[in-house]
């Protein structure tokens, strides 16, 4: 099982990767913005994408819409500081499978990951 | 017509009640959740634009129905301690990793606070900027009021400065 972690913050990517490890996912790739993420999904296949909202070049919501428009059905969890209800609704309507608001604990993220993809053997 | 002083005083009172508390709550939330630190808020004062001993200053803008800037000022030791806690590794110098960690802290504080206002459409968050060093002076636009909230914590002292205006 392989996950793509998309966030312009190296710090958050590290924290997310650590939480993924707690959920049993050790195989990860990283992207620092939406454009890098789109290139990554064209070059490789993923079982899960963790996606920030506010990023340079291409935002998370733009990336999510581009993925779904291209027919990509990989489960996406938005991991973002955007905490308004209207943002959550916008993301879910655009095809996000779940939504986690920063700040978060690694346990919270691991729990959401397990709910989406199950616990890897 | 109210004097400039009266207008400023009125502005301070409005900012204090309506805009300050969500940011203080967000500092508590972010520091406790991500850093295992419990900050203690100190007495509110007018911001000066001076670094006041800060080695790292992180800023992020908020725009929409309300426009403002959130500034986090960290002394050298506080910046290193917060980065160490966030990254989970020892850091001894202010490098790109520390700058990244500090910018994410102010990003989470601002994002968490702006959501508490629940504006429709939501306020927009800019990308954080980090200034390293203390040889600078922020020139505040005329007519804006900046408030400084100092904090003490087991990770060291730091302060947050805010300005907010309704459009």
Image (cartoon, rainbow, N blue to C red):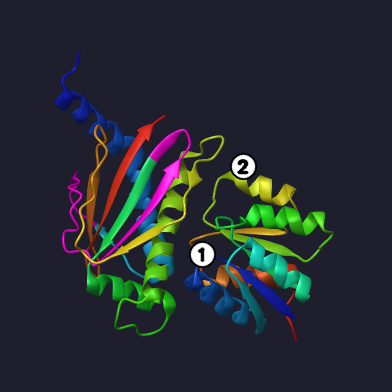
Q: Is residue A12 magenta?
A: no
Q: Report x, y in % for residue B130.
A: 35, 62
Discs 2, 1 touching: Cβ within 8 Å? no
Residue A86: mark: 2
Which chain does the numbered disc 1 sit on?
A
Residue at 76% over, 75% down: A43
Going 51% across and 36% down the picture, which residue do you hit?
Answer: B119
Chain letter of disc 2 in the image: A
The residue at the point 78 percent across, 66 percent down is: A74
Please name the residue that numbered disc 1 is placed on: A104
Mark 1 residue element: loop
Between tags 2 and 1, which lies in front? 2
Q: Would residue B88 appear left or right of B6 to someone viewing this image? A: right
Q: Could you say where residue B159 lies in the image, as x and y percent from the top left? A: 24, 57
Q: Position of residue A25 (x, y in %)?
A: 67, 81
Which span of residues is magenta-colored?
B41-67
Q: CA distance from mark 2 to mark 1?
A: 19 Å
Q: Earlier in the sequence, mark 2 or mark 1?
A: 2
**Residue A46 appears in the rendering:** no
Residue A98 on image: x %, y %: 68, 59
Quadrant location, the C terminus of chain A: bottom right
Q: Nearest the camera: A68 or A96?
A: A68
Which part of the image, by quadrant, shows the N terminus of chain A? bottom right
State the residue lying farthest toward the right: A71
- Secondary structure beneath dot 2 equals helix
Which of A34 and A86 lies nearest the eye of the viewer?
Answer: A34
Q: Residues within 10 Å of mark 2 (few under 14, many from 20)?
A: some
Q: Is residue B50 magenta?
A: yes
Nearer to the camera, B90 or A102: B90
Left of B78 or right of it: where is A49?
A: right
Q: Vertical placement of A82 versus A119: above or below?
A: above
Asked whether residue B73 is in view, the answer is yes
């Amino acid at each position: 099982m392989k996950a793509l972690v998309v966030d312009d913050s190296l710090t958050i990517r590290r924290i997310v990767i650590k939480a993924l490890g707690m959920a049993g996912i050790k195989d990860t790739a990283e992207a620092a913005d939406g454009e890098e993420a789109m290139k990554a999904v064209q070059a490789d296949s993923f079982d899960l994408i963790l996606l920030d909202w506010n990023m340079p070049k291409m935002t998370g919501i733009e990336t999510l819409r581009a993925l779904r428009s291209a027919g990509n059905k990989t489960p996406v969890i938005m991991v973002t500081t955007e905490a308004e209800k209207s943002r959550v609704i916008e993301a879910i309507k655009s095809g996000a499978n779940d939504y986690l608001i920063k700040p978060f604990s690694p346990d919270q993220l691991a729990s959401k990951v397990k709910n989406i993809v199950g616990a890897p053997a | 017509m109210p004097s400039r002083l009266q207008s400023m005083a009125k502005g301070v009172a409005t900012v204090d009640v309506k805009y300050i508390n969500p940011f203080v709550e967000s500092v508590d939330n972010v520091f406790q959740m991500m850093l295992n630190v419990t900050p203690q808020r100190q007495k509110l004062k007018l911001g000066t634009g001076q670094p006041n001993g800060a080695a790292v200053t992180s800023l992020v803008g908020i725009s929409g129905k309300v426009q403002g800037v959130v500034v986090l000022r960290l002394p050298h030791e506080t910046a290193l301690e917060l980065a160490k806690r966030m990254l989970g590794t020892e850091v001894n110098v202010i490098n790109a990793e520390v700058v990244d960690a500090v910018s994410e802290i102010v990003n989470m504080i601002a994002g968490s606070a702006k959501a508490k206002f629940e504006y429709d459409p939501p306020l927009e968050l800019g990308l954080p900027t980090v200034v390293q060093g203390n040889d600078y002076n922020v020139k505040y636009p005329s007519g804006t009021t900046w408030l400084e909230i100092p904090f003490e914590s087991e990770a060291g002292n730091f302060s947050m400065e805010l300005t907010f205006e309704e459009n």
